[in-house]
Image (cartoon, helix red, strand yellow):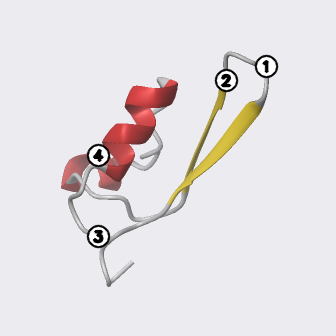
Amino acid sequence: HVDHGKSTLVQALTGIDPDRLQEEKDRGMTIDLGFAWLRLPGGNEVSIVDVPGHERF
């Protein structure tokens, strides 16, 4: 699932960039787990874990 926009979708939904590490930003790929959260209109909270898609990570 490399380069399918998982982190981009998380950021669009939550406003949180799950790619925290500078190396992730430089390489344009998730290397370590990222976390984000959002509150749904009904008040429920959703936690999201963004995982690497590349087989090496």
Label 4 – label 3 distance at C-alpha: 18 Å
Q: Closest to the observer: 43 or 15?
A: 43
Q: Of helix, strand and loop, which one carries label 3? A: loop
**Residue at the (75%, 18%) spot, across then down:** 42
Q: Position of residue 8 (x, y in %)?
A: 32, 40
Q: Closest to the observer: 9 or 42?
A: 42
Label 2 – label 1 distance at C-alpha: 5 Å
Label 4 – label 2 distance at C-alpha: 28 Å
Callout 3 amino acid = His
Label 3 – label 1 distance at C-alpha: 31 Å
Q: Are marks 4 and 3 in contact (CB under 8 Å)?
A: no
Nearer-N-terminus badge (4/1): 4
Disc 2: CA contacts within 10 A as few (<14), some (14-19) or many (>=20):
few
**Residue at the (20%, 59%) spot, across then down:** 3
Q: Of helix, strand and loop, which one carries label 2? A: loop
**Residue lying at the far top of the rendered structure:** 41
Residue 52, above or below 23? below
Residue position for label 1? 43
Q: Position of residue 20 (x, y in %)?
A: 47, 45
Callout 2 amino acid = Leu
Residue position for label 4? 25
Disc 1: CA contacts within 10 A as few (<14), some (14-19) or many (>=20):
few
Q: Of helix, strand and loop, which one carries label 4? A: helix
Q: Are marks 2 and 1 in contact (CB under 8 Å)?
A: yes
Nearer-N-terminus badge (3/1): 3
Nearer-N-terminus badge (4/3): 3
Name the disc covering residue 1, or none: 3
Label 2 – label 3 distance at C-alpha: 26 Å
Callout 1 amino acid = Gly
Nearer-N-terminus badge (4/2): 4
Q: Of helix, strand and loop, which one carries label 1? A: loop
Nearer-N-terminus badge (2/3): 3
